[in-house]
Image (cartoon, rainbow, N blue to C red):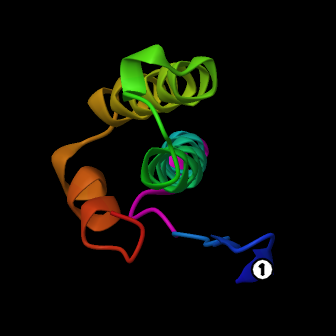
Amino acid sequence: MLVTNNFIFITMKITSITKKNQSMVNKAVNWLIKYNEFNTQRDFISDNLECEEYESKEWKSINRKCENAFDKYLDYMSELPKREQAQIEKSELY
């Protein structure tokens, strides 16, 4: 765990049940970590805004990144078997 500028970055290695799925598991986990980081930033910006969220360029930008990261995560998850998906969803990251 790495703490910088009040944000906590978690790096985690999840070993796949089947070796051939390890690459896809790594990609899904990395996008989930990115999503969590963007979501934390988005929450921080939301809490400190003086205007509505839809009026803030900064919030819109981080929201777009957050949505894209989660979409990528879902893309990689859809290519994994259910048991690999369950293992990722049981982790601390989810």
Left or right relative to 57: residue 87: left
Q: Residue at x 44, y 52 (%)?
A: 43
Q: Please, is residue 26 above or below residue 15 in the view?
A: above
Task: State the quadrant of the C terminus.
Answer: bottom left
Q: Residue at x 49, y 40 (%)?
A: 50
Q: Nearer the viewer, residue 39 or 72?
A: 39
Q: Nearer the viewer, residue 19 or 70?
A: 70
For residue 2, which quarter of the picture? bottom right
The residue to which callout 1 is attached is: 2
Task: State the quadrant of the N terminus.
Answer: bottom right
Answer whether residue 29 is magenta in the image: no
Q: Nearer the viewer, residue 27 or 20?
A: 27
Left or right relative to 17: residue 65: right
Residue 80: % across, % down: 33, 38
Q: Please, is residue 60 above or below residue 9 in the view?
A: above
Residue 57: % across, % down: 60, 17
Q: Amino acid at mark 1?
A: Leu
Which residues are drawn in magenta?
15-23
Density class for disc 1 (Cα within 10 Å; few <14, some 14-19, many ≥20) is few
Q: Please, is residue 61 above or below residue 28 in the view?
A: above
Q: Determine the secondary structure under disc 1.
A: strand
Left or right relative to 20: residue 74: left
Residue 71: % across, % down: 39, 23
Residue at the limit of the structure toward the front, as seen here: 50
